């Protein structure tokens, strides 16, 4: 089987897995990036270096398909920090020397929302991403899968634009102003995503973690640890439902301590995959709670080489390898574990 047919077979496998209508129940991603140079930071002055690094990564992923029997889908990675949409709204950006950039707050009080300019997706921070993605796609061809840049929920982006010292207070005292800002963010976010999918196709690899989606949207929802369930249902859940309906499903990452929202997460329409980044005991509990509801890809998959999950759970197992030999051992372990392959 040639590389293109192997990739198509993997895409079909992901589709069945996420639809929950047929085997498989387990997917395996082996992370084998040895030999790649350090990734350039996503700074404006590093555009050329970012393109070359992403191209090298893609070439290595394509080469791995020929011999590594996991479920990775090679993809083009226009990576960013969390700052991109907040910067589009006019936030200053801090660019540390050794880590990803991040936005500095622009809004401090509810009465400043009315004067905020809603940007066009052609503004520089977003246009630069299209330039990077266009060049990578030009090299790879129209069939190459694109990875999303760092997509966060409208409320998470609002929390970057608005100083958190007053943002959380405003959720209680000025919730309409919070909703107004989130609605403006959603307008820009959906305009960006509409153009992105029009240019590069509806299927993609999520920003984090790196699973394949045949259709839909994926995002981070990290601000909810500090709010109560009523506030989640009032401020966060409606926008997740709107985005899921617009794009045909949703995958969600959350690294907040948010167990008090787990029941409400089951109300998110067409939740295709859930990723929580929490200690092992919390992740183990999540596997059980959501086993009958959605696919899961958490940061902990069990200790040792044998993975056990609740009955009916659909789980993406992610494991790192430092060599070809280690990678092959991991795929052999998966073949023994998953008889539905």
Image (cartoon, helix red, strand yellow):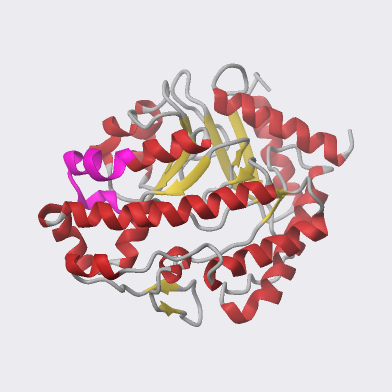
Segment tinted magenta in the rendering: 223-238
> Taking the image as drawn, is residue 51 in sight?
yes
Q: Quadrant of residue 319?
A: top right
Residue 302 to residue 45: above or below: above
Residue 250 to residue 99: above or below: above
Q: Quadrant of the N terminus?
A: top right
Left or right: where 170 falls relative to 248: left
Q: Quadrant of the C terminus?
A: top right
Residue 138 to residue 268: above or below: below
Left or right: where 311 falls relative to 112: right
Main SS of the magenta segment? Answer: helix
Identify the residue at the far left of this view.
173
Instruction: Work out whether residue 143 or residue 49 is closer to the camera in this orientation and state it.
Output: 143
Instruction: Work out whether residue 38 or residue 126 is closer to the camera in this orientation and state it.
Output: 126
Left or right: where 3 falls relative to 157: right
- Residue 22 included in the magenta stretch of the image: no
> Taking the image as drawn, is residue 273 in sight?
no
Q: Residue at x 85, y 41 (%)?
A: 3
Q: Residue at x 21, y 71 (%)?
A: 108
- The percent coordinates of residue 76 (x first, y second) are 70, 55
- The percent coordinates of residue 330 (x first, y second) are 67, 40
């Amino acid at each position: 089987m040639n590389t293109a047919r192997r990739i198509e077979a993997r895409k079909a496998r992901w589709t069945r897995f996420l639809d929950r209508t047929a085997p498989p129940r387990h997917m395996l991603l082996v992370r084998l990036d040895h030999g790649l140079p350090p990734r350039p930071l996503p700074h404006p002055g590093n555009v050329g270096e970012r393109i070359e690094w992403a191209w090298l990564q893609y070439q290595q992923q394509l080469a791995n398909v020929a011999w590594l029997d996991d479920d990775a889908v090679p993809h083009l990675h226009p990576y960013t920090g969390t700052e991109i949409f907040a910067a589009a709204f006019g936030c200053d950006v801090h660019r540390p020397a050794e880590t990803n950039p991040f936005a500095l707050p622009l809004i401090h009080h509810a009465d400043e929302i009315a004067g905020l300019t809603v940007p066009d997706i052609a503004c520089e921070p977003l246009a630069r991403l299209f330039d990077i993605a266009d060049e990578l796609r030009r090299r790879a061809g129209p069939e190459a899968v694109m990875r999303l840049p760092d997509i966060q929920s409208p409320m998470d982006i609002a929390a970057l634009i608005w100083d958190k010292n007053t943002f959380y207070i405003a959720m209680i005292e000025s919730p309409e102003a919070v909703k107004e800002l989130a609605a403006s963010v959603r307008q820009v976010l959906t305009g960006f995503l509409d153009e992105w999918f029009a240019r590069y196709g509806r299927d993609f690899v999520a920003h984090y973690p790196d699973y394949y989606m045949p259709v839909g949207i994926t995002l981070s929802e990290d601000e909810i640890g500090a709010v109560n369930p009523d506030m989640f249902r009032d401020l966060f859940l409606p926008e997740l439902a709107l985005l899921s309906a617009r794009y045909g499903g949703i995958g969600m990452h959350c690294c907040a301590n948010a167990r008090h929202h787990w029941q409400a997460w089951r109300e998110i329409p067409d939740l295709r995959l859930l990723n929580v980044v929490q200690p092992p005991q919390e992740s183990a509990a999540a596997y059980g709670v959501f086993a009958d509801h959605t696919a899961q890809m958490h940061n902990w998959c069990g200790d040792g080489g044998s993975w056990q999950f609740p009955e009916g759970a659909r789980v993406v197992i992610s494991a790192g390898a430092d060599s070809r030999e280690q990678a092959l051992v991991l795929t052999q372990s998966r073949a023994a574990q998953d008889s539905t392959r």
